[in-house]
Amino acid sequence: MNKCLFFLASLLLASSGLIAQKLFTRSGEISFYSDAVVEKIEAYNNSATAVLDASSSRLEFAVLIKGFQFEKALMQEHFNENYLESDKFPKATFKGNFLQPEAIQWNQDGRYEIVVKGELSIHGLTKIVEIPTIIEIAKGKTLGTASFIVKVADYGITIPKLVQDNIAKEIRVEVKADFQPLPQKGNN
Amino acid sequence: MPAHSIIKSIMKKIFLYLLLLALLGAAVGYYLWNKPHQNIQAASVDANVTAAQLFAAFEQDEAKANEKYLDKIIQVSGRIADSSTGTEGQIKITLESDDPLFGVICELDPLSEHKRTSFLPGETILLKGKCTGKLMDVVLVRCVEP
């Protein structure tokens, strides 16, 4: 890790004056909410990875399904074994491009509301989605937040009739990423 | 005794037994619905590895490593590269691997009591938790110091 810090420092020195950079986090927070007739379910995961590339206007994030924590152990089991089959599909990923890359002034503090369009893959199925995202740049820190709806049926997730009123057909997902500069392997 | 009151008493008995069965069923259902999360401290260990070994296994063949380690209780030892506390108090310890940038992230179990919550980089530590796979690092959740 000391090697990493050295490379990081030299990269920062080399790129001072460079506006665009790759931003990264491995502590992204992803949570989702199901608001159904019978029950409210929520789960969170604090180890999502996200990469924000200012120069190519790309945003990617990935999360390990088995890392989602639920209040009820039984619900967590059903989520993993029956709904998302996380043994077969351990990750959910998103890779997208900003629709209006010029909207963000990377070297200026501000709050930028943009839309990122790309591929969302859950449970082995991929759909093109548009995710409204907010990028906040303040005092050298970049925070990205996104909130979107996932239609359970779109990703081949079948909810048994018995629990149909316990789980909503549309799940609200929230992503929060506090970005750091991406560590680089070697000198680019 | 007249025939119909014998039948009545048998039916009453059947009804009571069915009621008992229904109550038992409800109790089991209630227990399952509210069953606690697995006790990690008490769980049996599926694999004992070093952080470097675990990371290398995933680097070399992710599918095979998933088959071997995904969802299993892993006891992992390694040197602490970093430890951090998140906005909601969640504590993460990153263990060094042979890769200069990435290693094994261990999230401390929010459901357990921990002997200590401050960890110094450079220290060697043993942690036990559930493997959830690899993104850039291998991620273990619900970790405790065994």
Image (tube, rainbow, N blue to C red):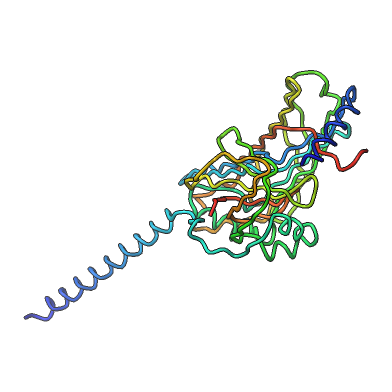
Q: Residue furthest front?
A: B123
Q: Depth check: A116 or B14 in front?
A: A116
Quarter of the image holding residue A3? Answer: top right
The image shows residue B110, relative to residue A144, as above or below, that is: below
The image shows residue B133, relative to residue A140, as above or below, that is: below
Q: What's the residue at 74%, 40% (across, down)? A: A50
Q: What's the residue at 55%, 36% (across, down)? A: B89
Q: Depth check: B39 or A20 in front?
A: B39
The image shows residue B76, relative to residue A145, as above or below, that is: below
Q: Position of residue B21 (x, y in %)?
A: 31, 68
Q: Quadrant of the C terminus of chain A?
A: top right
**Image-based side of B4 in relation to B63, left or right:** left
Q: Depth check: B134 or A92 in front?
A: B134
Q: How many numbered tags mark residues here?
A: 0
Q: Position of residue A58 (x, y in %)?
A: 83, 36
Q: Position of residue B28 (x, y in %)?
A: 37, 62
Quarter of the image holding residue B45? Answer: bottom right
Q: Position of residue B9 (x, y in %)?
A: 15, 74
Q: Residue furthest left?
A: B1
Q: Depth check: A121 or B68 in front?
A: B68
Q: What's the residue at 73%, 55% (across, down)? A: B52
**Image-based side of B34 in relation to A80, left or right:** left
Q: Quadrant of the N terminus of chain A?
A: top right
